Amino acid sequence: MSNCNNCSCGTSITNKNKENSTKKSYFRAGISFTLLMSGIAFSMFDIIFFENQWVRLAWYLLAYIPVGIPVILEAWKSMLKKDVFSEYTLMSIATVGAFVIGEYPEGVAVMLFYAVGELFQDSAVNRAKRNISALLDVRPETATVVKGDLLETVSPEDVNIDDVVEVKVGGRVPLDGVLQNELASFNTAALTGESVPRTIRKGEEVLAGMIATDNVSRIVVTKPFGQSALARILDLVQNATEKKAPAEQFIRKFARVYTPIVVGLAALIILLPWLYSFISPEFVFTFNDWVYRALVFLVISCPCALVISIPLGYFGGIGAASRHGILFKGSNYLEAITKVNTVVMDKTGTLTQGIFNVQKISTIGDITENELLKIVASVETQSTHPIAKAVVEYANQQKVNLDKTKNVIEIAGHGLEATVASKKVLVGNTKLLTKNQIEFPAEIASIPETIVVCAVNGAYAGYILVADAPKEDAKKAVDSLKELGVKNIVMLSGDKQAIVSKLASELNITQAFGDLLPEGKVEHVEKLKIDPTNNIAFVGDGINDAPVLAMSDVGIAMGGLGSDVAIETADVILQTDQPSRIATAIKIGQFTRRIVIQNISLAFGVKLIVLILGAGGIATLWEAVFADVGVALVAIFNATRILNKKDLLT
């Protein structure tokens, strides 16, 4: 017998089981609803066969079983776990009581409403959630080991220290090591969040998870896979997730108090009059009458309005959020986001576009901006560096006709030397000009963004500033959060501190920290968590953000362009990649919470009145139906109001 150890296989089976279970739940609810409605119709139209008491009982039992038995089984499981007074217990007692007093439709309706509410809740959660198996997508599945003139593909776990691995362009580095090539460029955004690809020289460290961007690279392995940077990040995600305690739904906490009180009061409705009959001979205790009152009391007290309106209230909030491109993975996060008073945001991909663009062209002397762009872009066509590609792309957008270049020489770590239109041109960083003893303005050194300087025939000609631009609504996002009372806003990034500070100043963020690895981001959030008054939401994308997303009170991922790991680890996903939707998410959470509180107050208020009347024998089952089903319907209509709310984006 073969064993399947593939995680994705197990996940697939689990998903299929969940899907089948959901279909069965819908099928059971559909059968129950059809039988309930048809039974009520038979009674209304005085269908002859339905006047028989045993036929009615059998009919409604058939309607009750599909939705009632699962709840009764849950009540039994709770009892086995010594959780005797759960909401399942009360609903079981109340619905059985409804059948005992002959109110079969009520008994079925209570269970049906609860089943439908659970289906709505599960549907919202299942639609938003995906399998955590996406974590495995970032883990390199194979490593190409160099053995003499041969290349052997093996599992990263089978690679030994001092083995040489080869990584092709676009391939992910499988293990930590040192570079053998003279020079290579790697995309490190997944690990550090750093927006600028890193140029690594021979003998310098290369980390697992980096992606080769310019040429085939060979790396000498220095650590086994289990100790690699990527493995450590995945481990951080797992550990941080374990720190997040599961949120208990309000109804279950409430039921632990409410259920024993209601059951006890129902028992007292029978017991106290019976005891009183021994004290006062004039008082005649009729057992059936008081049992009837107790059962009516239980029917009235069944928290149908709560168990349906609370999930539906949150479901309405989740639905409204979805319409605005915001996915909540559960109602507990919709509740948690209302308490957020500290928002920590990653820079690259969250507040900025994560794409390099030419921001500015500065020239000197008679040379025009178009001329400088033409010269620099002509030379940069010979480079595969992302910054060079950004300059060339911008030139193409401006419809600049580029010249052919000759005698191109790459000067490692400095830039390019070439001949363009019979002119000797230098294009690169300021070190290139210094190396060639070319003077340039001193203020250039203080520019935090990435710049490409240019010299023509030994004279400084100007520079092109290339940067990751802020998103259009980044400033609005910060302002909106402050308007909602979130005063503590922090920005974290793997980029240079100078770049981070400049952006923070533009967006009016007072706390900004750069030069951070994933561990550094975790440390900053852990410091904030020391203060118990801080309820933290972290917003980010990329593998590097996953540990912080998992350990924060509410993790928010930029889902449109964010990595799968960030999306899987986060509690809330912004599909539009607009940071301003953070404030929208908080508004939706706050409005949803108001609706839920209104529904709870309505249910308690009406039920309290009818409970007292029922105990006194004044309320009839009509009042019981209103207190239970009627209030539930009102609560449902109230819960749907959020779907029509228009001012959530303002």
Image: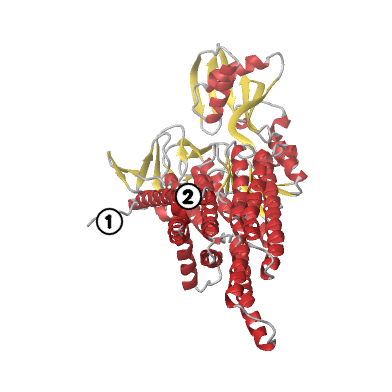
Q: Which residue is mark 2?
A: 47
Quadrant where the N terminus lies?
bottom left
Residue visible at 46% across and 32% down in the picture: 214
Is residue 339 in sight in this rendering? Answer: no
Q: Earlier in the sequence, mark 2 or mark 1?
A: 1
Q: Pinpoint residue 39: horizontal percent, then vertical percent.
A: 49, 51
Q: Which residue is mark 1?
A: 3
Q: Nearer the viewer, residue 611 or 557?
A: 611
Residue visible at 70% across and 30% down in the picture: 444
Cα gap from disc 2 to disc 1, whole angstroms: 59 Å
Q: Nearer the viewer, residue 606 or 15?
A: 606
Q: Is residue 500 above or below residue 229?
A: above
Q: Nearer the viewer, residue 267 or 556?
A: 267
Q: Amino acid at mark 1?
A: Asn
Quadrant where the C terminus lies?
top right
Q: Amino acid at mark 2?
A: Ile
